[in-house]
């Protein structure tokens, strides 16, 4: 299975979480982080699709970008969950980031 099948929905969830944080709490930090990480993951997914349609197995830049985003989100959201014990959003994002296939590429 190619990584863009996971990267694009993962990016949409992160982006949606940032927008939801802004709408619900007025958190500009949530919006910025969601847009930044979500946008980066969507870019990585687009690069992966582009490499796939070009006949390449993967894009090195996309793989590195996906892995860095997953690692950063796992670390930051795990720390946030440990401090707050709130499942939404920290526990959910930490869990899906840790379960992402990008960790297997390291």
Image: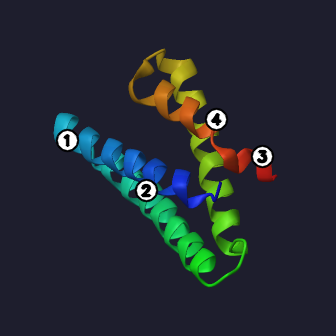
Point 82% across, 52% down: residue: 106
Q: Nearer the viewer, mark 4 or mark 1?
A: 4
Q: Looking at this view, is 26 or 46 the one in front?
A: 46
Image x and y of residue 61, in percent: 68, 73
The quarter holding residue 57 reads bottom right
Residue holding disc 4: 99
Q: Nearer the viewer, mark 1 or mark 3?
A: 3
Label 2 element class:
helix
Q: Earlier in the sequence, mark 2 or mark 1?
A: 1
Relative placement, left or right, of 38 versus 80 is left
Q: Which residue is mark 1?
A: 26
Q: Give the crowd class for mark 4: few <14, some 14-19, many >=20 residues within 10 Å.
A: few
In the shown orientation, is residue 12 left or right of residue 46?
Answer: left
The residue lying furthest to the right in this view is: 106
Return the mark for residue 12. none
Residue 104 has which mark? 3
């Amino acid at each position: 299975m190619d990584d863009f099948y996971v990267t694009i929905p993962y990016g949409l969830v992160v982006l949606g979480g940032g927008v939801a944080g802004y709408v619900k709490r007025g958190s500009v930090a949530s919006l910025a982080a969601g847009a930044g990480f979500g946008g980066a993951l969507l870019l990585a997914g687009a690069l992966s699709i582009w490499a796939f349609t070009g006949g390449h197995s993967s894009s090195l830049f996309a793989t590195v970008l996906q892995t860095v985003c997953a690692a950063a989100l796992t670390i930051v959201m795990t720390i946030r969950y440990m401090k707050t014990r709130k499942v939404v959003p920290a526990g959910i994002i930490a869990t899906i980031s840790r379960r992402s296939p990008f960790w297997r590429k390291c």
